Amino acid sequence: MHAGKAFLVTGAAGGIGKATALGLTRRGAHVALADIRVDALREAAAELSDAIAVAVDLADPHSIAAAVQSVEARYGRIDGLVNCGAIVMHADPLEVAWVDWERQFRTNLFGAYEASRLVAKAMIAKGVRGAIVNVASEAGKKGHIDSLAYSASKAALINMTRTLSAALAPHDINVNCVCPGGVTTDMLREVALAYGKLVQAPAEDVFNQLISSQLQRRIEPDEVARTISFLLSDDAFIVRGQALNADGGDTPY
Ligand SMILES: NC(=O)c1ccc[n+]([C@@H]2O[C@H](COP(=O)([O-])OP(=O)(O)OC[C@H]3O[C@@H](n4cnc5c(N)ncnc54)[C@H](O)[C@@H]3O)[C@@H](O)[C@H]2O)c1
């Protein structure tokens, strides 16, 4: 499906990012895995057949520029970008520190914008009909009181997706986002730990309750990865500017 194409996946040392990179290489693509956790990143890239590791800090525009440049230099073009890297911080909704707003927005939104902007320019310069997939969250639609700033950053990402989709349509670049929920990754364990503290329940119990009500189980990273792969493909040509839920039916809008 993606034979010969070159993709850049951020957050690729993490659960969903790594599964996405793996799925794309299995479908014939070259993949640049980018993340801030360099050791985990190198390990993840080493496990794949056609992949490179690129260190990046999504909170730093210079670092993003260097990463995009190195991927272009390696593959000569970029056919798709997956903005998957993100952080979540938990706090009382009336006590979110300014600095934590900044950290989450820099990483989750500004980083995704900067990567999208630079990759889109590279695509336009080379006449590539590309795709960008932003990994938002069901939190960006519903909002969670214990991760208010994170939820707001994902809502902004959904909004940015719509606008970039309209802006890039004349260049044949398709922009969508996927909104996962309850996916078995380190981030969900982090969420369970923090929420457990808030409601004074054991993290393991909270983790076990974070399941899709329709499927009665958690979503696996590979399942989100397949949704992302679809959105990167020509099969998604008429799906544009959307925020597609990948949460087992828990978000009805
Ligand atoms: N797991 C879930 O249930 C769930 C639900 C909704 C949305 N999401 C979203 O899915 C995406 C992937 O999350 P995941 O569940 O795989 O979690 P994860 O923690 O396994 O992966 C996130 C990755 O982002 C990287 N990252 C963080 N800050 C970075 C920075 N400054 N620069 C570069 N990389 C950075 C981390 O090192 C990590 O590898 C995130 O955008 C997250 O918000 C996850």
Image (cartoon, grey):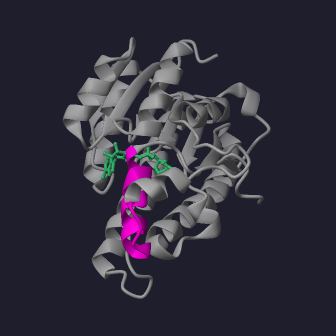
Residue 191, by quadrant, is bottom left
State the residue at coordinates (42%, 31%). 18
Q: Percent x, y for residue 135?
A: 53, 48
Whether residue 201 is in magenta: the answer is yes
State the residue at coordinates (41%, 66%). 196
Q: Percent x, y for residue 84?
A: 46, 44
Relative to the observer, which residue lies in front, 14 or 198?
Answer: 198
**In-image side of 97 versus 218 (left or right):** left
Q: Percent x, y for residue 102?
A: 34, 71
**Compared with residue 136, is residue 99 higher up or lower down, i.e. above or below?**
below
**Residue extending furthest toward the bottom:** 94
Magenta span: chief secondary structure: helix
State the residue at coordinates (55%, 59%). 157
Q: Percent x, y for residue 121?
A: 49, 42
**In-image side of 245 versus 72 (left or right):** right
State the residue at coordinates (70%, 45%). 169
**In-image side of 57 versus 153 (left or right):** left
Q: Can residue 168 be seen here?
A: yes
Q: Which residues are magenta?
A: 186-202
**Compared with residue 4, is residue 134 higher up or lower down, i.e. above or below?**
below
**Compared with residue 184, is residue 98 higher up or lower down, i.e. above or below?**
below
Q: Can residue 86 be seen here?
A: no
**Residue extending furthest toward the left:** 39
